[in-house]
Image: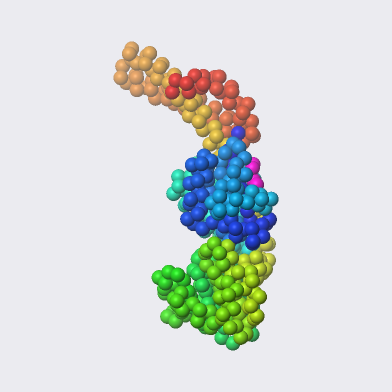
């Protein structure tokens, strides 16, 4: 009697960065994957979520399609060996487990940085892509709006989001720590994705960095970001001048979105590093090759290394976790009630149609012998009677749903109202 909602999840919980980056999806790939799963596997209530820490597919089907989804993901990423990655995936094959997992992901309970604000925006984007692809049904629409409402309550009623412990702020904390002994540290941000943009804003608002330079393939995006702050606060360099900017920078923060590393050993070796140079790689897949750290004087930090840098607000957020879990549990109960009601709504509609048909038949019998005023009175009286009869049965049915006993009541109601017959002549 429950909606067959399921989830397939590749996340930092099981999969190291080296695995996650092989199957990460950008927006265009997420949209293509949605269409592929919808048309080829005939899945509904689809949501494809891909962030630096996870790639997940939520779907509805009576059967377990996790193996097919993993194969399709491998095909999309040109990884014929994707089946061997199956042990790194978590499967949520019961609707209660899948809905709870999506709640915890979206709210930030299941995040590397607990309470990360960015994830709810990424879930909203994934929902928009699902809606655009006509891949979201009533169940997913209701679920996501319930999650967004719960997120608002978490924001307003708890200290779960107090402080700044997002991945981007954790990156700022790391930069501050690395440059604590550097006079006038020079920071270069390459690539202005969501996290890169947030890091730039943190850097611009910090008093620790007088020199912050942006480099983005689309200069207009860099100019828009720089315009948010006082003139000169954020400098801009074109890609043509990137090599010189790399030589000048003490810290390079990269969030370049591409399949292979942009910063290679050869590129960095030619920079003639004279002192320490720090690369902070926020991209998944990684944009800084693993052997770059072999260049003397170069240190590389990736997204997994940044997790430990979000400690300032973490204790307060962890203290609020029980309150957040209570809000989620309450929302899950309400959503479960709605979900069960939705499953019996077709039989309620058929009951209503059956009663209405009987009412019209009886009206037809008597209205020929009645005056217009009597016909009107009969119509009002029989309609009111029908509503009262229907209301009692609907209340009993919904109460049975909440007790998980509806399957015992449905056959009885079907016989009483001849619903199979009504459905056959509809």
Report the side of 341 relative to 369 (left or right): right
Residue at 59%, 47% (x, y): give it: 71
The single residue placed furthest to the front in the displayed view is: 266
Magenta-span inclusion, residue 164:
no
Pick the front one: 25 or 261: 261
Question: Which color scheme did the rendering employ for the protein?
Answer: rainbow
Residue 379 quadrant:
top left
Pick the front one: 392 or 192: 192
Residue 344 higher or lower than 126, as above or below: above
Q: Position of residue 345 (x, y in %)?
A: 51, 33
**Does the image show residue 205?**
no
Magenta region: 89-94
Pick the front one: 13 or 361: 13
User: What's the magenta bit mostly, secondary-structure-wise?
Assistant: strand
Residue 368 higher or lower than 60, as above or below: above
Q: Quadrant of the C terminus?
A: top left
């Amino acid at each position: 009697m429950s909606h067959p909602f399921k989830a397939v999840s590749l996340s930092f919980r099981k999969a190291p960065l080296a695995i996650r980056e092989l199957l990460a999806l950008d927006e265009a790939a997420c949209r293509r994957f949605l269409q592929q799963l919808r048309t080829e596997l005939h899945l509904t209530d689809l949501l494809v979520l891909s962030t630096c820490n996870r790639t997940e597919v939520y779907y509805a089907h009576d059967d377990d399609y996790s193996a097919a989804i993993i194969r399709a993901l491998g095909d999309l990423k040109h990884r014929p060996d994707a089946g061997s990655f199956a042990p790194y995936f978590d499967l949520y094959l019961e609707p209660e487990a899948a809905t709870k997992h999506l709640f915890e992901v979206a709210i930030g309970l299941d995040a590397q940085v607990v309470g990360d604000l960015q994830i709810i925006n990424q879930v909203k984007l994934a929902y928009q892509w699902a809606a655009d692809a006509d891949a979201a049904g009533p169940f997913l629409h209701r679920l996501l709006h319930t999650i967004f409402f719960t997120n608002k309550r978490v924001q307003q009623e708890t200290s779960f989001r107090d402080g700044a412990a997002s991945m981007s702020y954790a990156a700022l904390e790391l930069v501050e720590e690395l440059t604590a002994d550097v006079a006038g540290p020079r920071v270069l941000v390459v690539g202005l994705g969501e996290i890169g943009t947030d890091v730039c804003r943190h850097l611009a608002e910090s008093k620790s960095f007088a020199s912050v330079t942006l480099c983005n393939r689309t200069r207009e995006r860099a100019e828009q970001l720089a315009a948010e702050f006082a003139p000169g606060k954020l400098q801009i360099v074109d890609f043509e001048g990137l090599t010189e900017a790399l030589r000048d920078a003490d810290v390079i923060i990269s969030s370049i979105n591409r399949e292979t590393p942009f910063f290679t050993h050869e590129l960095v070796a030619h920079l003639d590093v004279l002192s320490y140079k720090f690369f902070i790689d926020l991209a998944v897949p990684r944009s800084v090759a693993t052997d770059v750290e072999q260049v003397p004087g170069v240190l590389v930090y990736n997204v997994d290394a940044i997790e430990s840098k979000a400690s300032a607000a973490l204790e307060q957020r962890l203290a609020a976790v029980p309150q957040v879990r209570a809000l989620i549990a309450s929302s899950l109960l309400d959503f479960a009630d709605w979900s069960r009601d939705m499953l019996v709504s077709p039989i309620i509609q058929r009951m209503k149609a059956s009663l209405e048909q009987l009412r019209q038949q009886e009206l037809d019998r008597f209205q020929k012998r009645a005056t217009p005023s009597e016909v009107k009175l009969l119509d009002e009286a029989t309609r009111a009677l029908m509503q009262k009869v229907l209301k009692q049965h609907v209340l009993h049915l919904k109460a049975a749903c909440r007790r998980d006993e509806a399957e015992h009541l449905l056959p009885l109601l079907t016989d009483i109202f001849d619903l199979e017959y009504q459905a056959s002549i509809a």
